[in-house]
Amino acid sequence: MKNYVSASILSADMLNLEKEVCRLKNSGIDMLHFDVMDGIFVNNITYGLPVLSAIRKITDMTLDVHLMITDPIRYVERFAENGADIISFHLESQSNTTETIREIKSAGAKAALAIKPATPAEVVYDYLPYLDMLLVMTVEPGFGGQSFMPDACAKVKPIRERILSLGIDCDVQVDGGIDSITAETAKKAGANVLVSGSYLFRAEDMSAAASELKEETGC
Ligand code: DX5
Ligand code: ZN
């Protein structure tokens, strides 16, 4: 299975975002992970549509938007119009899951469903045939730089098995506390899209860190 790296710009130098985006692209990173927080679904507030649209103008990288907001269905069309290629929203949000998936797809983006660490794997099974990606949070959403939660990552295995048994094409993304060691655990469990913020931006050699994250596990 091919692995992809999605860099969370929550850890980027915000005053030099254009340079940072070029650095990601030149380091062989596949996607740019854009964390949107509304201060209600999670305590923190980040950035939104104008920043996404500015990034869209300067890059052809895949823009992977992670909505940590209370009522995502109200905004998915605008995120797609402003450049999102993939839109993840939370199962724990207030929006109807099936309708939100439909709305994302009709806006022309890929649809992904995200689950928090305490949400059991089984609750996503019925949605898998309609999704392009399933996002398993390996930290509590809200902040970068937290420690990886192995118990949350354990859900990746049954989810990947379900995807295989359904014979469908659905990526499994992990997000939170991903570094070269925890990425190995996540890939072994069946994840193939690794979100990484602090590890990548702190690395002395971003290209080397990215290729390590992408390396195949051999099983
Ligand atoms: C957390 C965010 C993550 C975060 C990852 O709520 O969804 O995308 O930026 O950052 P690290 O890799 O530092 O845990
Ligand atoms: Zn995220």
Image (cartoon, helix red, strand yellow):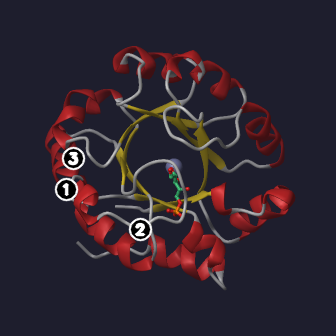
Q: Please name whichever residue, 147 or 207, is drawn nearer the observer in this view of the structure.
A: 147
Residue 161 image offset from top left, x and y in percent: 16, 50
Mark in the foreground, 2 or 3: 2
User: Would you say 129 lies left or right of 206 here?
Assistant: left
User: Would you say 217 lies left or right of 59 here?
Assistant: left
Q: What is the crowding at mark 3: few (fewer than 14 residues within 10 Å), some, or many (at least 20)?
A: many
Q: What is the crowding at mark 1: few (fewer than 14 residues within 10 Å), some, or many (at least 20)?
A: some
CA separation, marks 1 and 3?
5 Å
197 vs 81: above or below:
below
95 vs 122: above or below:
above
Q: Is the C terminus in the top left, top right, bottom left or bottom right quadrant?
A: bottom left
| Amino acid beneath label 1 | Lys
Q: Which mark is residue 159?
A: 3
Q: Is the N terminus in the top left, top right, bottom left or bottom right quadrant?
A: bottom left
> Pointer 2: what residue?
147
> Pointer 1: what residue?
157
| Amino acid beneath label 2 | Ser
User: Would you say 80 lies left or right of 99 here?
Assistant: right
Residue at the location (58% across, 36% down)?
A: 39
Whether label 1 touches label 3, CB < 8 Å: yes
